[in-house]
Image (tube, rainbow, N blue to C red):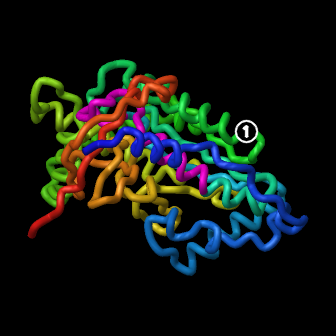
Amino acid sequence: MVVASDVKALLEDAIKPGGNPPPGDADRGSGKGLSFGTTVTRQFRAGALTGQQQRLFQQCFDTCTANGSPVEFCIPIGGYKKWRLAAFPEVDWAELFHLSLMRSLGFKIASRYRPGVTFTYLWDDLMMLDINANGFPPGSDRDYCRSFQMLLDYLNFLCSGLHVTFSLKKMTDCYQKDSYMETFRQFLGRAEEFWCNPDNSDTVRALEDRSRTHYYCDNGTADQSQVREAAQQIWAHSQVFVDPAVFVDPRSQIPVLLRSGPPRYLCLRPYYSSMVQFWVGEGVVAREGARLYPTIASSAGPPHYRLEGTVPTGEYSFLGRNFRQINVVTKVVDEK
């Protein structure tokens, strides 16, 4: 049975503004001795840190504290909501849960280091260049990022004066668009040759499978020609920009992935209880036995959930149309 008061209390606790960073002595305020390993702990990380990563990210901390500048985390995001979700094309509770986790990390740093921390989200805004590899309706990417910016504004309001800030930056602002398009077209012209090479069959299959999953098609399944065209655009884009980390200065910025990834990235959890990236997941309240907890769920699973009920949350509707209610789900136990 869904108890609305329990769910609302849980949501309030998950996204409440929180208090001021605790006061400290001069050393605490200056960030002297600020340790990356003991600050960005396992509750935030998606996995263990290697010794090389510890040194790399500690150097970034040290550079920031020496310069008196905020610690900056740069987080590339898809810049869209998975179209199979009811929330499409706007954000939902998944994004808000994620931002609350980042705020907690930010408070932890700001409690030791007065200049604080900023979280910069890098939006891969290819549709601005008329590259629509997912077949989304025109303007849906803007709808998503407008709604995401509303959440960032809300978090900045909650964190006002606490030295924790959030911002959204378009990747197209980081490079020359004309030069990019020229190189992109060159690779797109080589795509058929790449596709026809039997040595690339595994890569081609993976690209097309991804495109088939993500391609917008509200009346069934995308046909093979659409899938191939989309996959070839994604491949060409990946040849121009192999890695979003090229937009990050590792001396003063920490590149982040919200999943496991290569060692040059700090791999963080999208949320405490989930490894689902927020733009492809739904924010829900999950029940597991007697326990209730907020999480980001994937329709593809695992884990799998069964809808238990819906709780009205009109008090949060100022954040957008997807905050008028929240689904409560039950975790399905795998009996194998």
Where residue 200 sits: x, y (%)? 19, 57
Q: Nearer the viewer, residue 74 or 102?
A: 102
Read off the residue under disc 1: 160
Q: Going by the picture, which residue comes out furthest to the top?
A: 138
Horizontal side, residue 309 vs residue 65: left or right: left
Q: Nearer the viewer, residue 276 or 23?
A: 23
Horizontal side, residue 257 vs residue 169: left or right: left
Above or below: residue 171 compared with residue 285: above
Q: Nearer the viewer, residue 171 or 313?
A: 313
| Segment colored magenta | 81-104
Q: Nearer the viewer, residue 147 or 185?
A: 147
Answer few, some or many: residues within 10 Å of disc 1's Cα (few below 14, many 20 plus, some between 14 and 19): few
Where residue 205 sits: x, y (%)? 16, 52
Quadrant (top left, top right, bottom left, bottom right) of the N terminus: top left
Let me know if residue 269 is in the magenta part: no
**Residue in view at x 30 percent, y 48 percent:** 297
Horizontal side, residue 148 vs residue 295: left or right: right
Where residue 64 sits: x, y (%)? 76, 59
Where residue 16 sits: x, y (%)? 58, 43
Above or below: residue 332 compared with residue 179: below
**Residue in view at x 25 percent, y 38 percent:** 309
Query: Can residue 184 be seen by looking at this rendering?
Result: yes
Tag 1 secondary structure: loop
**Residue in view at x 18 percent, y 38 percent:** 228
Above or below: residue 59 compared with residue 193: below
